[in-house]
Amino acid sequence: MMQEKRELLGRGGRQVVSAALVLTAALFFLPALMVGGEPIYQRPETGELPGGEAVLPLDPAQGAVTAARRDRGRAVRLQTKEGEIVELTMDEYLWGVVAAEMPASFQEEALKAQACAARTYTAIRQASGSDKHPGADICGDSTCCQAYIQRSAAEARWGLSAGEYSQKIEAAVAGTDGLGILYQGQPIQALFFSSASGRTTDAVEVWGNSVDYLKSVDSPEGEEVPNYRTQVVLGAEEVEALVLASYPGADLSGDPGTWFGQAVCNEGGGVISIPLGGVSLTGGQVRSLFSLRSASFTVTWDGAQFTFDVTGYGHGVGMSQYGANAMAKEGSTFRDILTWYYTGAEVGELW
């Protein structure tokens, strides 16, 4: 995705569409995030297709997914990491995205939410295109688009759990067949990240632009998240070199204990802004500068080194993946999860 794709969204039909494209371009270079050290940025139902053809549920006898009729009828041109362009059906492609973006051990409703987010992002990319991969709708490079893994590679990684996990992801993709996340009738920039420190972050705090559906909300994950709390320790010389390379106007003379000023934080503990050498930086800028896992941090100086105590992982905007899993464990459906994390949005048909 990240762990990493859209800016403005005004109110009203045309503003929503144009702002979605602006945010797509502005966030295009965000790195995809990681869950548990792996790249990060699935609903069995019956129904009826537009032509009247029934959408079949899972076949419990065979354990096979017999839905995904809408997705199966759409093609995705994917540029692989090796530069090859391959054409896949939408359900094949989404299987590889969900397998790469979220741990398959997660709850089924969390996997469904991830599938909807991935499908929505893909719809945006197909509509807007990119000169970074001409001839393809999307690429498998997580620093540009969404992570993607081939089924054989994913199943090799899962080992003895391959059969179970493969079917879980098939069910998640098929169970959300054709569904995406909409705001005022238009696909949203369905940003997501690994884990929050109690609340997600308002988009305006990260990118300076307010987005109606990317507001701060409570997020229920906690100490069950791997590496939920981390530390980064740096000497004064390391900090000075990193800061001056990016912000040569910073004044880092004098006692290093005076370099950092008082941080302004949001309700979840995320840093909105912090003075550093007389330069006001956002929490995201500090996170990038010192390779922190999130912008939810505190920094202390003990006379010899700086210690950054960090909570959570990712930019904090949109859906928290571990939060989605925690909600699913408590009985929330994928629709509940998506409409919670994307304020005012709804789940609806993309095609």
Image (tube, grey):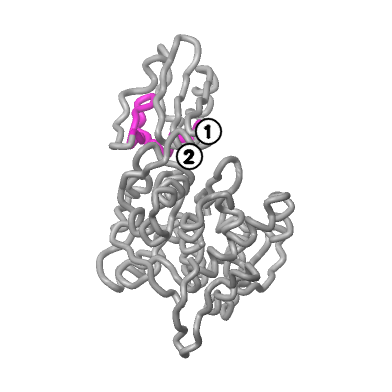
Under circle 1, the secondary element is loop
Tell me where the magenta segment starts and ends, as one range.
Answer: 269-290
Q: Amino acid at mark 1?
A: Asn
Name the residue tied to disc 2. 313
Residue at 32 percent of width and 37 percent of height:
268
Who comes first in sequence, dot 2 or dot 1? 1
Estimate the x, y position of residue 44 in percent, counting from the top left.
50, 69
Front residue of 61/159: it is 61
Residue at 45 percent of width and 70 percent of height:
179
Q: Is residue 288 magenta?
A: yes
Crowding near the residue tagged with mark 1, few <14, some 14–19, many ≥20 C-alpha atoms within 10 Å: some
In which quarter of the view is residue 96 placed? bottom right
Pointers 2 and 1 in contact (C-beta within 8 Å): yes
Q: Amino acid at mark 2?
A: Tyr
Estimate the x, y position of residue 351 in percent, counting from the top left.
46, 78
Name the residue tied to disc 1. 227
In which quarter of the view is residue 151 placed? bottom right
